[in-house]
Image (cartoon, helix red, strand yellow):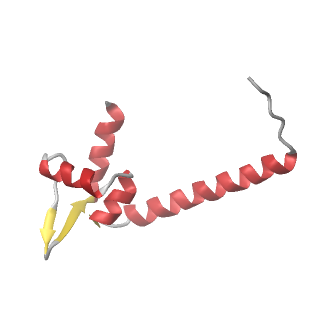
Amino acid sequence: MQIEILTREELQRFKSELIEEIKQTIRTHETVTNKQFLRSSEVRKLLKISSGTLQNLRIKGILPYEKIGGIFYYAHGDIEQLLGEIGNS
C-alpha cells in the first residue's frame, strides 16, 4: 500500500469541488421535490436509471404512472415510497 501526501492546495480544491457537488445535488432535489408529478426523464435522473429500467418498473407494476398524451407521469410520492423501499431492503 502506497501512502500519498496531499498538499493544502489539493485539499482545498477537493473541498471546493465537494461543496459545489453537494450544492448542485441540493438544487436538483429542491427542483424535483417542488413538483407533484414528474416526467420519465426526471424520474430517470432522480433514480439514476436507464429508460429500459424505468420501463421494467412500469411493466412489473412496481412504479405507478399515468399516461397523458403519450407522456408518462409519475407521482412524486410514489418515487419517494420506492426510494424508501429500496433503502429498507
**Is 59 in front, or is 75?**
59
Relative height, residue 40 to residue 50 (above, below): below
Direction front: furthest residue: 2
- Identify the residue at horizontal 86%, vertical 46% (top origin): 8
Q: Position of residue 5 (x, y in %)?
A: 84, 35
Tell me if 72 is positioned left or right of 89 in this view: left
* Residue at x 15% of width, y 73% of height: 70
Going 34% across and 52% down the picture, which residue do you hit?
A: 49
User: With 53 as the anchor, is 1 left or right in this view?
Assistant: right
Q: Is residue 87 left or right of residue 19?
A: left
The reply to whether residue 63 is visible in this rendering is: no
Residue 26: give x, y in percent of width and height.
52, 58
Give above or below for 88 relative to 74: above
In percent of width and height, residue 56 lies at 19, 49
Displayed quadrant of residue 87: top left
Looking at the figure, which quarter contains the N terminus?
A: top right
| Residue farthest to the top, as pictured | 1
Residue in the image at 31% along x and 30% along y: 89
Viewer-proximal residue among 11 and 55? 55
Residue 3, percent across and down? 79, 28
Number of on-image labels: 0
Q: Nearer the viewer, residue 78 or 62?
A: 62
Q: Is residue 25 in view from this perspective? A: yes
